[in-house]
């Protein structure tokens, strides 16, 4: 073998070894990316945990909520059963209108 062929074989072996190392490093990086969470993944996980806690709180407080809804329905039904008062006021401005409306509002507050 000539010295030129020997140098060519040595360069070829070095290039093959270098490519092998690069493939191993690339594979390691890709494998690590699958297992190392990114910032976005961490934020999503935190938000998911926060929402799960909220769901558990809502489920825990559900009986209180149903009691409150029933109480509100009773008060709305009681409010609807009251007689309605219709108040007719003039559509044009008069000098004593402000005083009359003030008196009327105080009467309705009683």
Image (cartoon, rainbow, N blue to C red):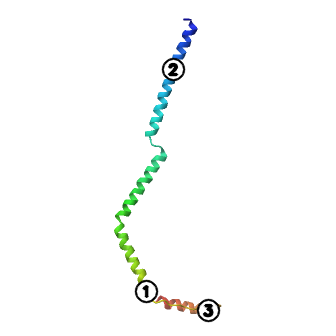
Q: In the displayed structure, does residue 41 sit left or right of residue 57?
A: right
Disc number placed over residue 81 in the picture, else none: 1
Give me the residue at 40% from left, 81% from top. Answer: 75
Give me the residue at 52% from left, 89% from top. Answer: 105
Disc 1 to disc 3, C-alpha distance: 28 Å
Foreground mark, 1 or 3, reads 1
The earlier-in-sequence mark between 3 and 2 is 2
* Quadrant of the snapshot with the N terminus: top right
Q: How many marks?
A: 3
Q: In this figure, which residue is indicated by the disc labeled 3? A: 90
The earlier-in-sequence mark between 1 and 3 is 1
Between residue 104 and residue 91, name the one nearer to us: 91
Q: In this figure, which residue is indicated by the disc labeled 2? A: 16
The x, y position of residue 39, in whole percent, is 48, 45
Residues tagged 3 and 2 counted as in contact (Cβ below 8 A): no
The x, y position of residue 66, in whole percent, is 37, 71
Q: Is residue 107 above or below residue 73?
A: below
Give me the residue at 51% from left, 20% from top. Answer: 16
Q: Residues within 10 Å of mark 3 (few under 14, many from 20)?
A: few
Which element carries disc 3, helix, strand or loop? loop
Give me the residue at 45% from left, 39% from top. Answer: 34
Disc 3 to disc 2, C-alpha distance: 99 Å
Q: Is residue 5 above or below residue 99?
A: above
The x, y position of residue 63, in whole percent, is 34, 69
Disc 2 to disc 1, C-alpha distance: 91 Å
């Amino acid at each position: 073998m000539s010295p030129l062929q020997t140098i060519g074989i040595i360069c070829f072996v070095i290039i093959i070894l270098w490519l092998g190392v690069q493939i191993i490093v690339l594979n390691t990086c890709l494998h690590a990316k699958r297992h190392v969470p990114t910032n976005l993944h961490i934020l999503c996980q935190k938000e998911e945990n926060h929402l799960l806690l909220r769901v558990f709180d809502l489920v825990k407080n559900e009986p209180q909520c149903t009691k409150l809804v029933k109480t509100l329905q009773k008060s709305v039904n009681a409010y609807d059963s009251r007689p309605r008062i219709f108040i007719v006021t003039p559509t044009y401005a008069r000098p004593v209108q402000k005083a009359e409306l003030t008196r009327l509002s105080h009467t309705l507050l009683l």
